[in-house]
């Protein structure tokens, strides 16, 4: 290699290094832009909401406007909490999961087992469409089905049905994708031992794909935890803890909406949002951990 | 072409008669007829794509998992056609070991060995289980290496150990015939030689059908060899005879490395 060529090579390498640095800088900048909203949101929620958070906040019902107003006027902390919302959210999410998880897993297994069948393709596309349906529309549907005809009034059951419909496509998809990732040889190994087919699914495929399916379920739950729109049309809300699923029930996101509409209770928005965020974040972290463990 | 010595096989462990396997319209195994002798290692050799694995997998009806594969012909075991008995029952008589070790990742070593019982819902007493596990692991010469870690996941073992674990899993259920689909192709030479030694030992109690594209392996451990080419059975005979004095020119060309 002669010297001129050598120099030219060095030149281009310098240019490349510069480009490399520029791109790196750009990537870092864009990453910062991406993460800044979540950092800012959490920062704001903590700064504004931490004062209200206490044991009382978790175990007491929402105060009425008058109590809140008096407390505000005296410069005191607003009494009461969001226990009615927490219990209502729990009831509805558990109910929704009880509906969506078994159905979702069974449909997911069906899609995995019959990749080419017309019914499976049809189901898969429809389930994708369902994932894109605006949540308020699902609330409307549940209103028509459950509120009007089953519980004859706003109810936790109606809320749970709308949330279940939201969760369903997520669980179907994650189940199918997880099962697809399991090598075929494992299925063959089980069959070669003379295992009946249903046991191959129950005892080998599901345990092997458990973590992936579980992650999908947790993500689905954390997605519906914060849903407000469908619940407005179905669960309506309640100022008391209500354990009857055929009666109107509160939920944390519904409470946030109510607090927003009441000038005396607007301070409670932050602490309730903080609670909701914390639950969603924790669920997210758990699902990440489980996914990591099994890799 | 079948050597004279073969014609005398009496009470074969397995009698394959006119077996054809189709992938869609493509005939991958063409009218193969072979009697497999009991308590021997029979090697199925041939170049890639000649249908060796396809033939092997027809024997425990693995092809039924896939819609596009069709099988014709008969395979007799104790004078009964395998296509007339339930696949589940058949597969319990025929263990299978795959190309890559595939222990169940959610199960411990111990559970992997008795997976056949567990998955089939056969309850064993604790003592019986321990006995089956120890016997099977001793059979595959793995017992001393894992006896203290029986309750760890099987996937923590090395590749060679995992493959021996998979053989133990196949043995635990007490099959008559063990089908092996290139069981050493994913293993290093030391692990390979351990598995080979094991096969020679195992033929005392089992009939082993081994697919291999490794000629020297077939020469080392098999008693009978079956040479396939383009889906056809070209030659079948005692391994010693085939390697020293092949009848068909294609066999000779393959064995001398002219193709394959």
Image (cartoon, rainbow, N blue to C red):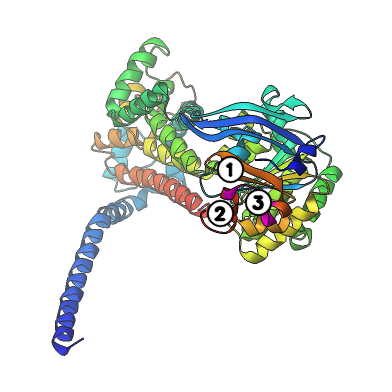
Parent chain of label 2: B
Query: In the displayed structure, does residue A168 sit left or right of residue B197?
Result: left
Give a yes or no on whether discs 2 and 3 share a subunit.
yes
What residue sits right under mark 3 in the picture?
A: B246
Residue at 18 percent across and 80 percent down: it is A9
What residue sits right under mark 1 in the picture?
A: B53
Q: Which of marks 1 and 2 is nearer the N terminus?
A: 1
Query: In the displayed structure, does residue B229 sit left or right of residue B139?
Result: left
- Residue B186 horizontal/vertical position (percent): 58, 57
The one nearer the camera, A271 or A263, is: A271
Under circle 2, the secondary element is helix
Q: Do the residues labelled 2 and 3 touch (CB within 8 Å)?
A: no
Q: In which quarter of the image is residue A261?
A: top left
Q: Give the range drawn in magenta.
A: B242-249
* Inter-mark Cα distance, 1 to 2: 21 Å
Q: Quadrant of residue A256?
A: top left
Q: Is residue A124 above or below residue B228?
A: above
What residue sits right under mark 2 in the picture?
A: B253
């Amino acid at each position: 290699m002669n010297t001129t060529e050598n120099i030219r090579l060095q030149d281009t390498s310098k240019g490349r290094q510069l480009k490399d640095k520029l791109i790196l800088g750009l990537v870092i900048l864009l990453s910062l832009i991406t993460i800044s909203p979540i950092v800012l949101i959490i920062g704001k929620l903590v700064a504004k909401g931490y004062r209200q958070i206490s044991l009382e906040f978790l175990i007491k019902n929402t105060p009425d406007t008058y109590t809140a107003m008096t407390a505000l006027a005296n410069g005191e902390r607003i009494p009461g909490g969001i226990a009615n919302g927490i219990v209502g959210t729990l009831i509805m999410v558990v109910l929704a999961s009880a509906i969506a998880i078994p159905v979702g897993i069974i449909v997911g297994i069906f899609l995995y087992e019959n990749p080419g069948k017309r019914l499976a393709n049809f189901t898969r596309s429809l389930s994708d469409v369902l994932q894109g349906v605006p949540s308020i529309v699902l609330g409307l549907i549940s209103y028509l089905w459950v509120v009007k005809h089953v519980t004859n009034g706003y109810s936790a059951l109606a809320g749970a049905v709308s949330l279940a419909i939201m969760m369903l496509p997520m669980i179907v998809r994650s189940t199918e994708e997880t099962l697809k990732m399991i090598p075929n040889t494992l299925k063959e190994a089980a069959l070669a031992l003379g295992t009946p087919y249903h046991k191959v699914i129950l005892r080998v495929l599901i345990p092997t794909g458990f973590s992936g399916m579980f992650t999908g379920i947790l993500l689905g739950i954390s997605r519906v935890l914060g849903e407000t729109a469908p619940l407005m049309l179905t669960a309506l809300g309640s100022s008391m803890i209500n354990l009857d699923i055929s009666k109107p029930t509160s939920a944390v996101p519904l409470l946030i909406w109510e607090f927003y509409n009441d000038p005396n209770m607007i301070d409670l928005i932050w602490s309730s949002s903080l609670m909701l965020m914390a639950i969603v974040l924790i669920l997210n972290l758990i699902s990440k951990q489980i996914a990591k463990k099994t890799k | 072409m079948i050597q004279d010595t073969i014609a005398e096989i009496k009470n074969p462990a397995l009698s394959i008669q006119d077996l054809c396997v189709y992938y869609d319209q493509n005939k991958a195994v063409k009218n193969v007829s072979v009697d497999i002798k009991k308590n021997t290692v029979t090697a199925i050799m041939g170049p890639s794509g000649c249908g060796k694995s396809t033939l092997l997998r027809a024997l425990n009806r693995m092809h039924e998992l896939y819609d596009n594969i069709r099988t014709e012909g008969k395979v007799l075991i104790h004078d009964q056609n395998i296509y007339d008995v339930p696949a589940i029952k058949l597969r319990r008589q025929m263990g299978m070991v795959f190309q890559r070790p595939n222990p169940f990742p959610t199960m411990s070593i111990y559970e992997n060995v008795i997976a056949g019982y567990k998955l089939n819902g056969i309850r064993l007493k604790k003592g019986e289980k321990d006995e089956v596990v120890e016997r099977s692991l001793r059979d595959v010469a793995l017992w001393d290496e894992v006896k203290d870690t029986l309750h760890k996941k099987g996937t923590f073992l090395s590749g060679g150990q995992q493959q021996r674990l998979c053989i133990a899993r196949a043995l635990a259920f007490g099959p008559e015939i063990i089908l092996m689909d290139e069981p050493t192709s994913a293993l290093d030479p030391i692990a390979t030689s351990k598995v080979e030694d094991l096969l020679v030992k195992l033929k005392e109690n089992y009939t082993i059908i081994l697919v291999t594209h490794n000629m020297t392996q077939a020469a080392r451990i098999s008693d009978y060899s079956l040479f396939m080419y383009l889906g056809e059975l070209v030659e079948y005979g005692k391994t010693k005879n085939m390697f020293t004095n092949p009848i068909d020119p294609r066999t000779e060309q393959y064995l001398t490395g002219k193709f394959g």
